[in-house]
Image (cartoon, rainbow, N blue to C red):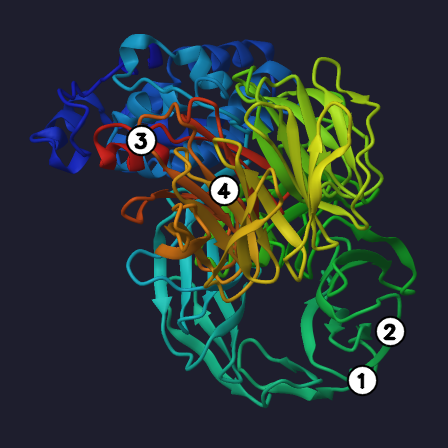
Amino acid sequence: MAKEKLIFNLCELQSSLLPNDSVIGLQDRIVTKIPSYIEYSCLYWAQHLSDIPFSENVLNLLEQFLHNNLLSWFEVLSLLKKFDRASSALLYAIGWVSSHSTNTLEFLRDARKLSTIFAAPITHSTPHIYMSMIPFMQDDSVVAKHYFRPDYSIVEIKHTGVRPVTPLLKVIEKEGRKSRVNRIAFSPDSQRIASAMEDWTICVWNVETGSISNGPFHGHEDNVFSVAFSPDGSRIASGSADETIRIWDAENGIVLSGPCMGHSGIVCTIRIWDSQTGDLIGTPLTGHNSAVRSISISPDGKSLVSGSRDGTVRVWDLDASPITSFTTDAHDDGVLSVAFSPDGSRIVSGCSDNKIRVFESKSGKLLLGPLKGHTREVWSVAYSQDGSRIASSSLDYTALIWDAHTGAIISGPLEGHRAVVIGIAFSPDCTRVASCSWDCTIRLWDATEKRKMDSGPVYRHTSAVSAVSFSPDKANQIISASYDETLWVWDSETSQAINGPIKVHDAGIYSLAYSPDGTRLISASADMKLLETQNWSVIPIQYKGHTNSIRCVSFSKDGKRIVSGSYDNTIFIWDVGTGEPVCGPLEGHTDVVRSVSFSPSGDSIISGSEDNTLKLWDVYTGKELASFEGHFSWVTSVCFSPDGTYVASASEDWTIGLWDWSERSDNEDDTISELIPNQRLVLRGHEKAVTSIAFSPPSSSIVRLASSSEDHTIRIWEPSSGEQLLVLGGHTLGVLCVAFSSDGSRLVSGGRDFSIRVWDVQVKSDEKALVNRCL
């Protein structure tokens, strides 16, 4: 039946550009092409499959269906407006296959992942199966690789730079006016997510389509901070900053109970309520000395655990009369989140000290931890339903998945949120994790993807990436430096490490620079090291003169000199080959010299300092030629324009300054006696400190200026007009460094999120096409 009826383009759609609702006569075609028995088979085959015992014959039939008819089945579900059924059907099939066939299981899991990622566009327009899903995923998906044919797609996908595989399945957010998402909870059937919103509402979302299925529910009079489904999924409980609790019908949003009132602001007590009547049961539970941030009831309903800002986890015996409790004292800071394991034997806690701990629930004995992985407070923790994993979310903008028995990180960091990640939840079927954030989104992640521990070391820095550069003589080679004291060399096309970690310093590395011919590299840390880039060996030359750590370095255009700036507030110019100072110390700055750069002619140097100024120096005499004042905070980065006629500066005051100078002569022979600084333009757009800037190389057809910022973005500017051309988002923490490739077509960036990213920033004649292409 499937072979005969489930065929490519079974409803004969003539255009791939129209949504289903705009196709004239489509409903008549659906009735003709998809008779009732085919509709029933497409909707319920998986449930029937799960009801029969495993057999090789049925497995062969399933494999034929998957390899020949899967996309046509997707077509039917799209046309019937039932595409949200695809994921649950494939989950039934996954359960049936179980461990009997590894290849079939991989194919099914990948098909389910695709059905979730592309549910929205495929629901909207059936041709997106072939126009979007297959071409976009052909490199990463066994299903897409199997089905890809050039005639399926009018879209050609090309990737530039690092293209990491991500477990992200979907981003869910409100249309129209956005709202921060404070907490989330899965329904018992894993098909819905309830969210507590800052706009005083509760929303219920369809997990597969990402659309609101019920709500928003209105009634609270302030931020909603907590939400939970009842065990049967029919009700939702919510807690709000209006000091009330309400219980809602999960389908229609009618308030079934409440508002339950009794709490008064930030309190140290716990109250237990009757969910049917809304009545308070017993008296408030007291014992904590500061705000109670989180509670969880054991699966058998006999115990309750609470976490408080007072640094304790308290376990309550609800069967005792009166209710009794004991505390665990293993925390060094406030406890922000607690959760019971599914069998009730363990408790996990997330803390303000950035760590996670696991306790025995009966005794309070510490079993695991403190587990380190997050770099800021752990705001939420959750167990998977099978008890094998723990998920955590943090103010560091990430989520992690841990092995609940060993404490090892098995997935993550899950990156993508652009603000603190407040809530985390496992789906009851254990296949997905949802996270919510103050960036107004819910993100759905594949919880089955794990770190590949058998593929060798994970090639990434273990601290912030402080400096990056493209190799001048190897177009696809990038070097990065980090506060973790190492250098790494990368292939920008494959994202694979070529060399590293290269350990030549005993302290964090602040800066690096290639020689113009790419054969040598200078790096700055507590000292300076010159490396030969053929085999990354240190050239035994010592540069002695600074009395404190080196903050910045740069090569001259002829490759014969190096300039360095230091925490000792001075600048030196060095002979590369001998290590002898050619000029210096150049004194004038009154604070740390953060950035230095040679002019294109090599006759002058520009420097930027934490004294809020930038200064222009004569290379040969060391004379200060001009001091540029105008920034209101530290100058973090400076560089010359490609033609050398002006300079740019980045500052902690969130701005970029463009400066030039005029010459004044007071002598009869017209020799120049003074340069008069002039601030020609101020570029504004970043929302936090600007950390680094770089001009496109002279070979570029159009001069552009790139900037990075603590606001997590990179921006591209047209410097003559100050127009902002592009905003690049992707880093999850502050971006510390940027650099153009030698032809100006690509940009590399490094950040506090330990990551290095490569961007295609090639300018086309159509500026809008550039923006759309890059975003």
Q: Earlier in the sequence, mark 3 or mark 2?
A: 2
C-alpha span from label 1 to label 4:
60 Å
Mark 2–mark 1 Cα distance, whole angstroms, equals: 9 Å
Asked whether the beta carbons under mark 2 and mark 1 sit within 8 Å of each other, the answer is yes
Measured along the vertical axis of the image, is residue 260 above or below residue 678? below
> Who comes first in sequence, dot 1 or dot 4?
1
Viewer-closest of 657 and 453: 657
- Asked if residue 386 shows in the view, the reply is no
Q: Position of residue 372 (x, y in %)?
A: 79, 50
Q: Which residue is mark 4?
A: 639
Q: Residues within 10 Å of mark 2 (few under 14, many from 20)?
A: some
Residue carrying label 3: 702
**Residue 502, quarter of picture:** top right
* Amino acid on which disc 3 is placed: Ile
What residue is shown at x 31% (from left), y 49% (from top)? 722
How far apart in space, not on screen, are marks 1 and 3 (Cα)?
67 Å
